[in-house]
Image (cartoon, coloured by chain):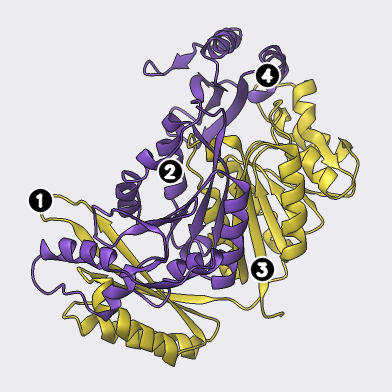
Chain colours: A purple, B yellow
Amino acid sequence: MTDTVTAAVLLIGDELLSGRTQDTNLRSIAEFLAPVGVEIREARVVPDDHDTIVSTVRHLSAAWTYVFSTGGIGPTHDDITADAMAAAFNRTIDVREDAVDQLKRHYGLRAPGQEINESRLRMARIPEGASLILNPVSGAPGFQISNVFVMAGVPSVMRGMLQDIGHRLAGGSVVLAKTVRGRTMREGDIASALGEIAKRWPATSIGSYPWMRPGGAAGPDYGVNLVARSRDADALSGAFNELIALVRSQDIEPETDPQE
Amino acid sequence: MTDTVTAAVLLIGDELLSGRTQDTNLRSIAEFLAPVGVEIREARVVPDDHDTIVSTVRHLSAAWTYVFSTGGIGPTHDDITADAMAAAFNRTIDVREDAVDQLKRHYGLRAPGQEINESRLRMARIPEGASLILNPVSGAPGFQISNVFVMAGVPSVMRGMLQDIGHRLAGGSVVLAKTVRGRTMREGDIASALGEIAKRWPATSIGSYPWMRPGGAAGPDYGVNLVARSRDADALSGAFNELIALVRSQDIEPETDPQE
């Protein structure tokens, strides 16, 4: 196993930048990759613009082990991702029989009225040399081109496609994480001691995440989550014990997740 | 009014890339900017890494009219955004009295036990020449440096800070949008006609957004949202009427939002 395997996520779609749509795909991909040991190092959201997609995917593909893209592979005029991916890797693109077969198999299972018209055939346009990614939800396949996995933008379809990707990944060593929650704790009261703990455990990355919600009759709900992350289980557990002691030092009962 | 005013959003934080936290700030910022006529052209998510933040903010600041960053301005060791912003613009950074005043005013209103210790003073470290952004929620200010607005990552705090930013923006012409929903409509059945409408209305951008949810006893819930966006109200309404007719042509009753 190699030590660090990296990835970028590329979210494609005007609707994510206009505020129309709340993205959830970045988090789904991150949750899928964490146990495989693939670390996401950056994510970008770009509009449905050919040149932007081409230049961005070239950059990300060269910078990281893997790239995961979502969006823009449907049948309509604003679905331009497949063409942009082909251009990014200087490949031709055309309707491919193996992709048509997947569409046919899917529509064959459906009620009548959903034939493979010219528009739907657009979804079988796949760059030369790319391998298909099965779509168990809505039929039209994604594809892998070089180190880039090209998936649909609809969250349920995207999650279905991830199931045909895991086995293609060379995983790295897994980053373990443990969280302790200090309700009513304030960052400003623990920041100094927390910095000392971070210094004592260099193989563990320690993050501090405050939260704050208006709350109801009981007043606002606030506090801090302290998260330790490490590839080394012993270092993780040593640092984590100190985080728990830190919460207790504030006269606050630490809350942890028994599943971690 | 200038015609097109652009922006980038820079989301800073390991927790967004690890899948621990679901970002909502991009969408909040987009919803805030839309009526002002500022168009978000790209968004990036980067880890808490000094060099990455410096190089990314330099790039985005040069490329777009405005940059909106969130995250990394708290009191703990992993809050490195303020220093990175100073470095990006070759400014010095130190505790500033005007920022200390804002902290004092906030903590003065609170119950005892929340004094301004050394850790909290870290939140008053502001790059030379930056102007403060009021934080009505938790006291510690954000700041504007050059064309970059540096805000907190906690969503409620970030939204509070936006209220002190609107009046600083030179707005552009506003992009109007209208949505029609076709429940049980399928993209593949309308893609060709939709492409024709898009060609007939070049001043209107037309997006097609399918959705699909497992659903309950009534079967899966699916359909397509068609969104027309334009700076020209007449072009918008002409294109939109054709979208409504397109949905009707599928024997589906179009659903629109009366508020739009």
**Residue type (three-letter) at the residue carrying disc 4:** Asp
Q: Distance between the residues labelled 1 and 3?
A: 45 Å
Picture disc at residue B122: none
Disc 1 crowd rating (10 Å Cα; few below 14, some 14-19, many 20+) is: few
- Element type at mark 3: strand
- Nearer the observer, disc 4 or disc 2? 2
On the image, numbered disc 3 is attached to which residue? Answer: B6
On the image, numbered disc 1 is attached to which residue? Answer: B217
Measuring from the top left, give residue A205's x and y in whole percent: 62, 23
Disc 3 crowd rating (10 Å Cα; few below 14, some 14-19, many 20+) is: some
Disc 4 crowd rating (10 Å Cα; few below 14, some 14-19, many 20+) is: many
**Residues flagged by tags 4 and 2 on a common chain:** yes
Circles 1 and 2: CB atoms closer than 8 Å: no
In which quadrant is the C terminus of chain A drawn?
top left
Residue at 59%, 67% (x, y): give it.
A52
Nearer the observer, A188 or A47: A47
- Element type at mark 2: helix
